[in-house]
Amino acid sequence: MNLTKTPYTLDVQGLRITLPGTARPVLDGVDLHVGARETVALVGESGSGKTLTSRSALKLLPPGAVVEGAVRVSGQDVLTMNADQLRALRTGRVAMIFQDPRTALNPLRRIGDFLTESVTLARSMSMSQADATARAVELLRAVGLDESALHKYPGQVSGGMLQRVMIAAALMGDPALLLADEPTTALDVTTQAEVIALLAELRERFGTGLLFVTHDLDLAAAISDRVYVMYAGRIAESGPAEALFARPRHPYTSALLASTPRLEAPQGRLAAIDGHPPDLRQELTGCPFAARCPLATEICDQQAPAPQPAPGEPHHQAACHHSDRLEGSPVDV
Ligand SMILES: Nc1ncnc2c1ncn2[C@@H]1O[C@H](COP(=O)(O)OP(=O)(O)O)[C@@H](O)[C@H]1O
Ligand SMILES: [Mg+2]
């Protein structure tokens, strides 16, 4: 493997995506950065826009999406790329682990072919079939499977196994930037821990940058250098993982942290907050969290809050009119 590969970065600026049939953008001014060799978590409850944000890095967007803003991979604007450039990007050093492995796999192709074809077909890699198979076996072992998986069809293995296959597939091309969309959701806790360790090792050994999408705050805390908390298509809070979890500046982050005891991390802890995010069929003038927020006042319904740095912490930002009232203590919602 190439130990001296160039680090890749991801820069999302002011990303606004509008889908047909909605009254407001589904992503509304998202700013997100993954630095070289950095592990960044994108956290939020289901429907907040995490998948759309991560897929935008490869311009894999729903039909009819109207896109504004900029998405750059290592400085290159992805949104203006032509078909050839996009193909090179998608078969190159940026890999994605998709949220739903069954829809990403061809049911009529053996898992072994799926694993090896990306690296034997891509001109940039042109690995021999024998080398590709050896690498596939090595990676299957790394994710807790054995080589018998090579000969199986997707329909013959469990969802958890398929998710591990997807992780192995993403690592086949030795990615410099890995976009992992809830990669461990279908796994049991032990395998989940193994996969997290594998991703951490990847970064240590090869300097792979990682955008780790999850609805699990404990996982985010365990794996990331920095965290973005997303709510209703906007970044509610972002910052170094330690600061953000110790001193949340957005009532949504605070409520998430307060909603379930730490360490136990049941699936779906984010659902523990009462109420729902605002409907996409309705326009929104103020803060999207106002209806669920214990700190909301009149201004929250009238004016969308812009991200503001915490005092003395320029890289820790929250989009809230009342951050100062939080004083780092978890709010009960
Ligand atoms: N292809 C699509 N067509 C219509 N709406 C979509 C599509 N993809 C996503 N959405 C909507 O966009 C919002 C954000 O979706 P998504 O990025 O998948 O959220 P998350 O990954 O955080 O659960 C949701 O309200 C979802 O219903
Ligand atoms: Mg998703």
Image (cartoon, grey):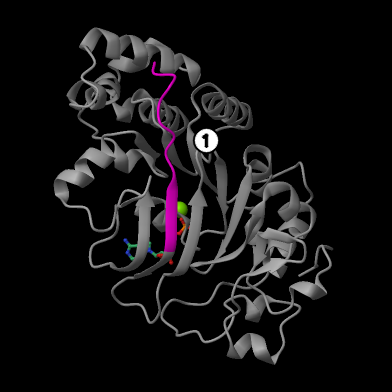
* Region of the chain picked out in magenta, as a range: 1-13
Judging depth in this view, the residue of 54 and 192 nearest the camera is 54
Instruction: Give yes or no for residue 9 being in the magenta stretch.
Output: yes
| Residue at 22% over, 39% down | 88
- Residue 47 in sight here: no
Where 217 falls versus 119 (above or below)? below
**Relative to residue 128, is residue 306 drawn left or right?**
right
Which image quadrant is residue 222 in?
Answer: top right
| Residue at 68% over, 59% down | 316
> What amino acid type should be assigned to the residue bearing mark 1?
Arg
- Residue 54 in sight here: yes
Q: Residue 90's spot in the image, x, y percent?
A: 27, 40
Q: Secondary structure at mark 1?
A: loop
Q: Residue 293's spot in the image, x, y percent?
A: 70, 76
Where 140 falls versus 77 (above or below)? above
Q: Which secondary structure type mostly characterizes the magenta part of the structure? A: loop
Where 282 falls versus 220 (above or below)? below
Which image quadrant is residue 235 in?
Answer: bottom right
Q: Residue 42's spot in the image, x, y percent?
A: 55, 52
Q: Quadrant of the N terminus?
A: top left
**Relative to residue 78, is residue 85 drawn left or right?**
left
Instruction: Give yes or no for residue 246 being in the magenta stretch.
Output: no
**Relative to residue 303, is residue 76 drawn left or right?**
left
| Residue at 49% over, 62% down | 31
- Residue bearing mark 1: 37
Q: Residue 23's spot in the image, x, y percent?
A: 38, 82
